[in-house]
Amino acid sequence: MTSATQRAELHATIWKIANEVRGAVDGWDFKHFVLGALFYRFISENFTNYIEGGDDSIDYAKLTDDVITPETKDDAIKTKGYFIYPSQLFANVAQAANTNTNLNTDLKAIFDAIESSANGYPSEEDIKGLFADFDTTSTRLGNTVENKNSRLAAVLTGVEKLSFGDFEDNQIDLFGDAYEFLISNYAANAGKSGGEFFTPQHVSKLIAQLAMHKKDKVNKIYDPAAGSGSLLLQAKKHFDNHIIEDGFFGQEINHTTYNLARMNMFLHNINYDKFNIALGNTLLHPQFGDGKLFDAIVSNPPYSVNWIGADDPTLINDDRFAPAGVLAPKSKADFAFVLHALSYLSSEGRAAIVCFPGIFYRGGAEQKIRKYLVDNNFVETIISLAPNLFYGTSIAVNILVLSKHKADNTTQFIDASREAFFKKVTNNNVLTEEHIEKIMELFDKKADVEYVAKSIDNNKIAENDYNLSVSSYVEAEDKREVVDIAKLNTEISKTVAKIDRLRMSIDVIVREIEGAAV
């Protein structure tokens, strides 16, 4: 099955499920049940494949729970991070969903059991609360047990019908594609949903390639505002697993999105011991400052959010912010995320960060932070992207690429906001593979291209008050028609002369007519 076919089938199935539960579950809440069911099916099938180990004589789903030995369970949890009994598998629960009068409470008990199976094991924190948002007893599903069960059955049987074979053989990013589809169809609610941020897969792909450019391997990759984990997973998708040696790390402040990020890791076959997603405020309570610095950092932090800033005088002494000598404004935390990422970056590392354009030209504290970044030669490239690439905002964002191993004292500016660098699809613009390749080629070569790319000496940037706006250095192409004034004046003179001759002719005709009338 091709990727286009798989994607079309996924979208059709989600829309069919949505129609069956429409009117009962708000569109944005509905996503938790669809994504939760996809996750439940995945870990069930993944766990089954592990237990069966390729032995066709074993059908784990048909075994009874009592044949499972404590040793089998213990070994499985140490390897996979969790345990699922045969009776708890998605396939068995979905098969009986339409006739199970205790479906909602049975599901809750199963999810609790899967999570608690990791208690006391190294995977405990990675498994805890994974199903928290798949609340099968919630009144969002209906006010009666019967209503809850019928809607849960519709979701489970809908997801069961997806005929993709093994999840691992899918041609698409199943979870990311489902999430993206849900966001695009419930965009009105997406922006109001508790600060959940999602980076479209095509933009994630560009950011991952920028951060990992020309790297044979990196020790680990990090996203300080991880969201659903899409940026981290694009790095995995684009590069062979073995070159990301120590795994995937991230921190996320929103509890729901934090759960989605952990689910997403499992869905992409990243074992619990190869990822570490932390819950909490990255700026005030960073979780990964004590270990080795990161060779690759990717991030799409929230644009211009409030933070405590100068109201907490201790922050100016924080190792992340102290070198710049100033804190990001309280109403605009953008540069706080940038400085945080820079401080976590290794000497051989590169960070690619999506930024709001205003931080590159505003004055005050932000100008002082730009001065610190430019004077220390940390800014490798700034890329201006096309508008309307993200859901919920039409802003034309920039990508800031930071590096601690630059060979020269220049900063590259790329204008990728022109029509040659995006394709319009329905209400949004997208970056195709061709567009990403164009941008990466410009980034790699660092050559000046008229109207598109230019490398500027940092001393000139200093003379320009540390303005890092792409439009200040890359001249926009003037597509207005060029008019030859001298030629135009000659043509006007000829036209005026013709008009004068015509007027004289008309005057003669008028006099002749008047004479004839007398």
Image: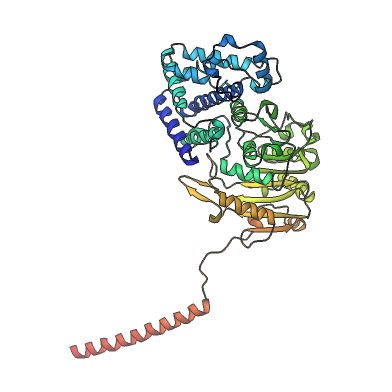
The quarter of the rendered structure image containing the C terminus is bottom left
Q: Nearer the viewer, residue 371 or 2?
A: 2
Image coloring type: rainbow
Q: Is residue 450 above or below residue 261?
A: below
Residue at 69% across / 20% down in the picture? 78
Percent from the top left, x then y, of residue 290?
A: 79, 30
Is residue 43 among what the camera can see? Answer: yes
Image point (69%, 29%), residue name: 274
The residue lying toward the viewer, choosing from 73 and 360, is 73
Q: Nearer the viewer, residue 56 or 8?
A: 56
Query: Picture quarter containing residue 351?
Result: top right
Total of numbered circles in the picture?
0
Position of residue 111 relative to residue 353, above or below, is above
Q: Left or right: 300 with respect to 14?
A: right
- Indicate the position of residue 320 as horizontal and vertical percent values: 77, 37
What percent of the width, then of the height, locates residue 229?
A: 62, 33
The residue at the far top in this view is 66
Towards the viewer: 95 or 205: 95
> Is 300 above or below relative to 52?
below
Quarter of the image for residue 491 reads: bottom left
The residue sitting at 50% across, 79% down in the picture is: 487
Q: Position of residue 371 (x, y in %)?
A: 76, 49
Q: Is residue 361 visible?
A: no
262 displayed left or right of 140: right
Name the residue at the left extreme.
517
Tell whether 218 sits left or right of 153: right
